[in-house]
Amino acid sequence: MNIPKDLLYSKSHEWVRFDGDIAYIGLTDYAQNALGDIVFVNLCEAGEQLETETVIGDVESIKAVSDISSPVDGIVDEVNGEILDNAGLINSSPYDAWLVKVSGVSDKSKLLSAEEYEKLIEELEKDN
């Protein structure tokens, strides 16, 4: 399982990459693997105000439909139209397939480091 060290993570399996004041949000390798082949993504719109843990969209796979939660507070600057047109990019390259770009992020305290996220995954796999 790929868990890049330069990203931050949520307990609901989203990754966050900061580029200055902008946060890119996507689904982790663990999430895409658990979902199976992703066929459709529905996302919020640019300009929406996000709060941590609120639903920003959903992802439909051959197995199920799952909500995507925002790991941060902020304002959606941009939605990745390429993902809306080709949801399978999440399966083939989850850490390049960002979903939304968010600005105005002030609180990173609920995000996990790569090491903390790896421990979370280990615990989840023990329980299954």
Image: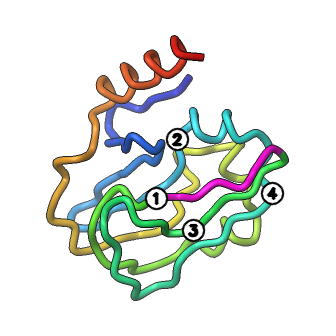
Residues 22 and 71: in front is 71
What amino acid type is highlighted by mark number 1? Ser
Could you tell me if the residues under marks 1 and 2 are in contact, i.e. CB atoms within 8 Å? no
Residue extending furthest toward the front: 127
Q: Which residues are magenta?
A: 63-68
Residue extending furthest toward the right: 62
Q: Real-space Cα distance between discs 1 and 2?
A: 12 Å
> Label 1 crowding class (10 Å Cα cut-off): few <14, some 14-19, many 20+?
many
What amino acid type is highlighted by mark number 2? Thr
Q: Real-space Cα distance between discs 3 and 2?
A: 15 Å
Instruction: Identify the residue position indicated by label 3 in the image.
Output: 57
Where residue 118 sits in the image (x, y, percent)? 40, 22
Instruction: Identify the residue position indicated by label 1 in the image.
Output: 69
Instruction: Identify the residue position indicated by label 4 in the image.
Output: 39
User: Of tags 1 and 2, which is closer to the observer?
Assistant: 1
State the quadrant of the N terminus.
top right
Residue at figure coordinates x 30%, y 61% from the top left: 72
Which of disc 4 and disc 3 is earlier in sequence?
4
Which of disc 4 and disc 1 is earlier in sequence?
4
